[in-house]
């Protein structure tokens, strides 16, 4: 099992602090997510159906006609490596660790990749864009060039865009479908709907058919599909949320910088700080009921966004102390 943010109950037990008393900054999830209304009772009593309007809402939001809903992008991360014969897969380090883990577990040779290496020696390149935890981004033209080189040899470019919704102009979603390009999207971060477990795979029909066969029917529950369709259709909320998140991300970077923790990178939803005493700082914050995401390689902390002004003040006070 790989470690992830969000282990709030485990932290509560370890430090003897009630879950309700924590400020959880460990996940990078929008703390002011889409306000989901109550799900109608009839939706709970039915199996999910492809004709429920989710596909149309997703196609309009992502600008792509070929989309497969999945139980969070994690389901696709684990299944995609099983659709190819073993090969050489490049994954940057650090990045969301489940990618390298899934490809390695499926028998592929996983290489720690950076842009200077190119793609000529790879069968698959997997990028998290923007990267988690570093926040690195790539120009769309650069991504499409790598894709073209890979696709010419039957390879894949897999782009995990879990944190891109605040900056949709950087997405490759609208370039899909095309052979060899696979884009993963999620409602967990920007929409703050991590518990619904809804994601999407944007790819050519052959890949989506093979992935759908592997994942089986009813991969996403009817209530989750109902919530996802409504969230994707709420353009007014989306347009208002983007500038708020971008401003909050900049505010968090400024706050950390003012306390000697200049971020090495980040996004609208988190900031990443590389420091040699990351474990000690993580521990001291946890003793005050503030949960951050600790990375061992390289030693670093990721800070998600506080929500209310009282949360911002609490974080500032803890950093000052």
Image (cartoon, helix red, strand yellow):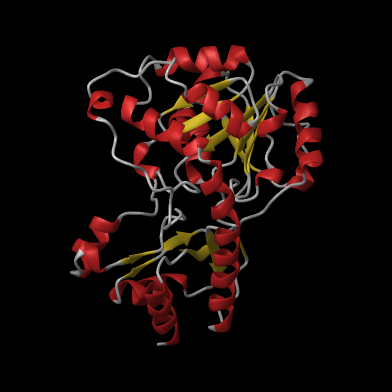
> 65 and 241: which one is in front?
241
Q: Residue at x 37, y 76 (%)?
A: 310
Q: Residue at x 53, y 39 (%)?
A: 100
Q: On the rendered structure, is 157 left or right of 268?
A: right
Where residue 228 sits: x, y (%)? Answer: 43, 34
Where residue 156 sits: x, y (%)? Answer: 67, 26
> 8 and 44: which one is in front?
44
Q: Residue at x 59, y 36 (%)?
A: 110
Which of the image's four quarters has the N terminus?
top left
Where residue 298 sits: x, y (%)? Answer: 54, 61
In the image, residue 144 above or below residue 257? above
Residue at the limit of the structure toward the front, as seen here: 236
> 1 and 133: which one is in front?
133
In the image, residue 119 above or below residue 4? above
Res 235 seen here:
yes
In the image, residue 31 above or below residue 182? below
Res 94 seen here:
no
Where residue 39 sits: x, y (%)? Answer: 29, 34
């Amino acid at each position: 099992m790989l470690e992830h943010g969000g282990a709030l109950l485990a932290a509560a037990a370890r430090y003897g602090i009630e879950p309700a008393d924590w400020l959880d900054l460990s996940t990078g999830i929008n703390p002011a997510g889409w306000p989901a209304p109550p799900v109608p009772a009839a939706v709970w009593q039915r199996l999910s159906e492809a004709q429920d309007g989710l596909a149309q809402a997703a196609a309009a939001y992502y600008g792509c006609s070929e989309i497969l809903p999945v139980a969070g992008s994690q389901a696709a991360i684990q299944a995609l490596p099983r659709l190819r014969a073993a090969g050489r897969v490049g994954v940057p380090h650090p990045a969301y660790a489940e990618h390298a883990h899934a490809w390695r577990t499926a028998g592929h040779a996983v290489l720690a990749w950076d842009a200077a290496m190119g793609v000529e020696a790879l069968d698959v390149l997997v990028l998290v864009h923007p990267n988690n935890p570093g926040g690195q981004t790539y120009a769309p033209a650069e991504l499409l060039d790598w894709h073209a080189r890979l696709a010419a040899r039957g390879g894949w470019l897999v782009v995990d865009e879990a944190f891109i919704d605040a900056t949709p102009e950087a997405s490759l979603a609208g370039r899909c479908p095309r052979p060899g390009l696979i884009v993963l999207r999620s409602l967990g971060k920007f929409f703050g709907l991590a518990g619904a477990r809804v994601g999407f795979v944007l790819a050519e029909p052959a890949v989506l058919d093979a992935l759908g066969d592997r994942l089986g029917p009813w991969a996403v529950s009817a209530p989750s599909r109902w919530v996802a369709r409504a969230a994707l259709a709420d353009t007014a909320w989306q347009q208002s949320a983007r500038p708020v998140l971008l401003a909050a991300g900049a505010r968090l970077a400024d706050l950390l910088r003012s306390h000697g923790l200049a971020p090495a990178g980040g996004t609208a939803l988190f900031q990443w700080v590389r420091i040699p005493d990351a474990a000690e700082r993580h521990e001291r914050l946890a003793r005050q009921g503030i949960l951050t995401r600790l990375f061992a390689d390289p030693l670093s902390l990721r800070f998600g966004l506080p929500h209310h002004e009282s949360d911002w003040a609490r974080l500032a006070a803890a950093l000052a102390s």
